[in-house]
């Protein structure tokens, strides 16, 4: 039997990159997929088609995860369309990297709102359904820089560190109702976002990683399958590093 057979997952920011890899990997394990992105564009349509090809129910929704009312609305729609929500992956995220001395208030606010507030918005919106079901797995996409910090990423690091505190608090609040909450902290993952880095920067990163390579979105997705499935039924409040050993 497939690990996520008969379950339904919401994955935010899943038109491309890590979110897309998670949606596809979950679908391969029999999971129905509701995914959101800022707009229903060609990338979202392509992901929807690929997921559908794996024989599960799938629907893409245009929704701004950073907006509270929009999130409540889209989750209501998803519950109506799918009848249940078993897994939530808070993956929506942006970067606006620059040194603190140059960082604008807008750059700070945008990253905190998209990366951190969106997790609050979605977790609050799905909580009612999961409480009714007395089960659920919430997976928050943090980062190794949320644990160790990084120069030029004060806003991003703060948002990802905030997600860890949020994850641990939710695990304590909802554990008695059978709802688990964990965070994944990816390291240097090769995606469109990191793909624009010059070769020498990428090689420098890789030389510092014990496994001597960047991770793939699939590496992150495989860890999420573990956290979403009953394989991790006694795991909650944890941060799992998917970083090739760069943060030990």
Image (tube, rainbow, N blue to C red):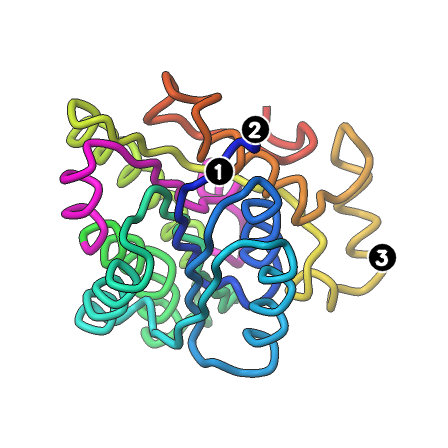
Contact (CB < 8 A) between labels 2 and 1? Answer: yes
Looking at the image, which residue is at 45% across and 80% down?
A: 39
Q: Quadrant of the C terminus?
A: top right
* Count of marks, rendered view: 3
Q: Which residue corresponds to mark 2?
A: 1
Q: Is 66 left or right of 55, judged from the image as shown?
A: left
Residue 141 is inside the magenta segment: yes
Q: Which mark is residue 200?
A: 3
Residue 89: give x, y in percent of width and height.
Answer: 41, 48
Q: Residues within 10 Å of mark 2 (few under 14, many from 20)?
A: few
**Distance (Cα) linking label 2 and label 1:** 7 Å
- Relative to 4, does residue 96 appear above or below in the rendering? below
Q: Residues within 10 Å of mark 3 (few under 14, many from 20)?
A: few
Q: Which mark is residue 185?
A: none
Residue 40 is inside the magenta segment: no
Q: Nearer the viewer, residue 6 or 103?
A: 6
Residue 178: give x, y in percent of width and height.
Answer: 23, 26
Q: Which residue corresponds to mark 1?
A: 5
Residue numbers of the magenta segment: 125-153
């Amino acid at each position: 039997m497939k690990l996520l057979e008969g379950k339904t997952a919401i994955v935010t920011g899943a038109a491309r990159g890590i979110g897309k890899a998670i949606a596809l990997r979950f679908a391969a394990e029999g999971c129905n997929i509701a995914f959101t992105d800022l707009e229903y564009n060609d990338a979202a349509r392509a992901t929807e088609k690929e997921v559908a090809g794996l024989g599960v129910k799938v629907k893409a929704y245009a929704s701004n995860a950073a907006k509270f009312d929009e999130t409540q609305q889209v989750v209501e729609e998803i519950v109506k369309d799918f009848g249940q929500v078993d897994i939530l992956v808070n993956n929506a995220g942006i970067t606006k990297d620059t040194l603190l001395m140059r960082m604008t208030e807008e750059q700070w606010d945008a990253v905190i709102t998209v990366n951190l507030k969106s997790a609050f918005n979605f977790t609050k919106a799905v909580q009612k359904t999961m409480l009714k079901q007395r089960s659920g797995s919430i997976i928050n996409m943090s980062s190794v820089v949320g644990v160790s910090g990084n120069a030029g990423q004060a806003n991003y690091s703060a948002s990802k560190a905030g997600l860890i505190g949020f994850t641990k608090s939710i695990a304590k609040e909802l554990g008695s109702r059978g709802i688990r909450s964990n965070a994944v902290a990816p390291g240097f993952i090769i995606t469109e976002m990191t793909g624009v880095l010059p070769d020498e920067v990428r090689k420098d990163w890789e030389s510092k990683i014990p496994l001597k390579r960047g991770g793939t979105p699939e590496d992150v997705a495989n860890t999420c399958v573990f956290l979403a499935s009953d394989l991790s039924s006694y795991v909650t409040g944890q941060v799992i590093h998917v970083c090739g050993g760069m943060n030990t």
